[in-house]
């Protein structure tokens, strides 16, 4: 393995982030080092010594990785913010349309039922936290883009994004689970009676898992930088 390849591999170990951008960053670093080594070779150094001089000029691998991390953090945060900005309204709209177009039998609850008011409250909370997640995604995307373009510290913005979207998705999940636990038989009957509602439910599980995974990756990056 060449000196430059070993150096780039060491930088890669300290550089987590989105695979595509991470690969591009490392390729850019390697190209720059090879250009520097080529210049030293033209100056009379051997190939090995030229590469050693090039990596020495670049600095310690940990410092190089630290210099690239804000860019990767901004990219990952942008992905998470975009996901929440798009998926939260989409899920709310999907549930609204599915209930209106394909209402399962027995979906309506009598106001006299003891759990009716609580279920209604939980439904309102679910919608409210869904809106919070969408707004957090929109605001987070705008803020991350603005700070990254002006080369300002992006970490505080990403911490706020993780906090807001994390609270939103956790609250939506908690409220939804609570509603189903209050009336488990009714929930199962409604899902079984309407295929579209069942499909929306399955899509919701997939999207929420995607949201949680994206939040986890972003949180791991931002707190690793701290």
Image (spheres, rainbow, N blue to C red):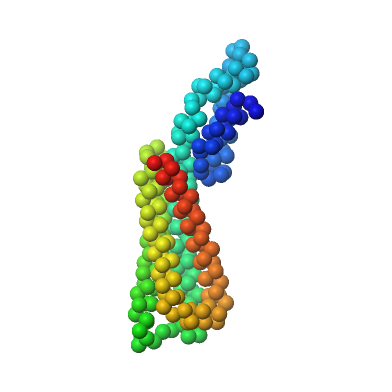
Q: Position of residue 23 (x, y in %)?
A: 57, 39
The image quadrant where one finds the C terminus is top left
Q: Position of residue 38 (x, y in %)?
A: 61, 20
Name the residue: 48% across, 82% down. Answer: 185
Left or right: residue 223 compared with residue 195:
left
Q: Position of residue 132 (x, y in %)?
A: 37, 61
From what the image shows, is residue 28 above or below residue 209? above
From what the image shows, is residue 222 above or below residue 186? above
From what the image shows, is residue 197 above or below residue 167? below
Extreme-top residue of the structure: 44
The image quadrant where one finds the N terminus is top right
State whether residue 27 appears in this view. Answer: yes
Name the residue: 43% across, 49% down. Answer: 219
Q: Position of residue 32 (x, y in %)?
A: 56, 27
Which of the 4 image quadrants contains residue 24?
top right
Marker count (numbered) = 0
Name the residue: 48% across, 45% down. Answer: 75
From what the image shows, is residue 167 above or below residue 9? below
Name the residue: 47% across, 82% down. Answer: 186
State whether residue 100 appears in this view. Answer: no
């Amino acid at each position: 393995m060449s000196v430059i390849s070993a150096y780039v591999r060491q930088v890669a170990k300290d550089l987590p982030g989105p695979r595509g951008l991470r690969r591009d960053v490392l390729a850019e670093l390697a190209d720059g080092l090879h250009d520097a080594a080529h210049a030293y070779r033209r100056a009379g150094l051997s190939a090995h010594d030229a590469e050693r001089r090039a990596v020495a000029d670049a600095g310690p691998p940990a410092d190089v990785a630290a210099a690239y991390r804000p860019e990767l953090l901004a990219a990952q945060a942008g992905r998470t913010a975009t996901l929440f900005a798009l998926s939260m309204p989409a899920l709310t709209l999907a549930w609204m349309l599915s209930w209106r177009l394909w209402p399962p039998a027995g979906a309506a609850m009598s106001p006299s039922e003891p759990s009716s008011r609580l279920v209604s409250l939980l439904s309102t909370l679910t919608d409210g936290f869904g809106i919070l997640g969408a707004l957090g995604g929109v605001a987070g995307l705008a803020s991350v883009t603005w700070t990254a373009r002006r080369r300002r510290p992006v970490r505080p913005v990403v911490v706020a994004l993780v906090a807001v979207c994390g609270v939103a998705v956790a609250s939506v999940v908690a409220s939804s689970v609570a509603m189903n636990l209050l009336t488990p038989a009714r929930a199962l009957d409604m899902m079984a009676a309407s295929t579209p509602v069942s499909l929306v439910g399955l899509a919701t599980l997939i999207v929420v898992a995607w949201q949680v995974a994206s939040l986890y990756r972003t949180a791991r990056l931002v707190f690793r930088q701290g």
